[in-house]
Image: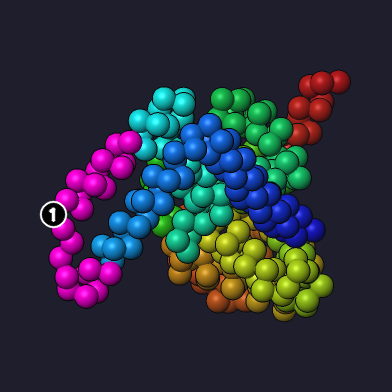
Amino acid sequence: MIARTAFEQILKEYDEKQLEAARELRERREQIEREVPRLKEIEDEIAGLSVSEAISRISGKALPGSYKDQLASLRAEKDKVLSEAGFTEDDLNAHYECEKCRDTGYVGNELCTCFKERVTNILYDQSNIKEILKEENFGTYSFKYYPEGEALDAAKNALQKAESFIRDFSRSEDNLFITGAAGVGKTFLTNCIAKELLDQGYFVVYLSAIRLFDILSDVTFGSFRTGSEGASSEFVKKHIYDCDLLIIDDLGTEMVNSFTATQLFNCVNERILGKKHTIISTNLSLKQLQDNYSERIFSRIANKYTFIKLLGNDIRMTKKLEEN
């Protein structure tokens, strides 16, 4: 599954990064100590003074006035012997690919931006959308396939709402519900939005409705394994419920039943409560959404989503006809 692959691969990568940083530090340290034998003596003396200071604080006894001078002198000597050998103080520290999280993937309890970017890259690589975004973006967006009148007006209105969604992304709690017949440009518009936000550094996860419910089914019924049940739940929480933007494409193409209805409500509701943005694209009309899913799903979407309806002919079919 896409979730398991991404999660396991990234955790392994971060473990390897930390091991590599530790190995490099150990080898660099050994080299420095060979070339600067006085370094170890200085560090031992500094450590001894630090221990004396700690003991004096606990006992309430003041250290001799020369303590600070000794410490400053040792530190200055340390810098000097390192510099003379062509090293710096920084060479004695581990060097991480990401200094913010020190290659752990987390800053405090939050996912680091480097981790988010890695997940996004894997998800997009596996879904082939990365290549699609090179073709489907605002730079290639065109109104030429929308007939004059209602369809063209709807397309222009959709573009305005999409641009507003992107512009206000960091300070709003808006979500989008994009509806329309097959081939009228729903996915194209969604891809345009995804690319803009990815380029701005946001954590965007794109899943077809079928893929989303496959993942949620695996987690719920226990066939999804990443070493432990908790790891699967962690993936869902961090990458489906907590990503900056979740795109659910083609809602309604999955088998609709009580399980998918419950999971859709949980996902929509959790993201609303967490003030995270969601885009849902579907061929379903509002009436069909209400009939196919529960009333509470319809209510949450009706109250918390901006609606975009695209009209017109099947653009994909029109393009194929032009090619022939």
Kindly identify the amino acid type of the residue bearing the numbered disc 1. Answer: Gly
Please name the predominant secondary structure of the magenta segment in the image: helix
Is residue 61 found inside the magenta-colored segment of the image?
yes
The front one of 134 and 303 is 134
Instruction: Using the rendered view, name the quadrant where residue 168 is placed.
Output: top left
The quarter of the picture where the C terminus appears is top right
The residue drawn where x is 23% and y is 68% is 56
48 lies above or below 321: below
Q: Which residue is labeled 1 in the image?
A: 65
The residue drawn where x is 64% and y is 45% is 23
Q: Position of residue 221 (x, y in %)?
A: 78, 77
The residue drawn where x is 46% and y is 45% is 40
The quarter of the picture where the N terminus appears is bottom right
Is residue 56 found inside the magenta-colored segment of the image?
yes
Query: Which element is circle 1 on?
Result: loop
Q: Position of residue 236 (x, y in %)?
A: 64, 65
The front one of 108 and 279 is 108
Q: How is the image coloured?
A: rainbow
Left or right side of 26 for 254: right
Q: Position of residue 18 (x, y in %)?
A: 61, 50
The front one of 84 and 142 is 84
Left or right side of 209 for 30: left
The residue drawn where x is 73% and y is 57% is 8
Q: Is residue 228 visible?
A: yes
Q: Position of residue 29 (x, y in %)?
A: 55, 41
Instruction: Using the rendered view, name the quadrant where residue 297 is placed.
Output: bottom right
Left or right side of 62 for 302: right
Label 1 neighbour load within 10 Å: few <14, some 14-19, many 20+ = few
Segment colored magenta: 55-77
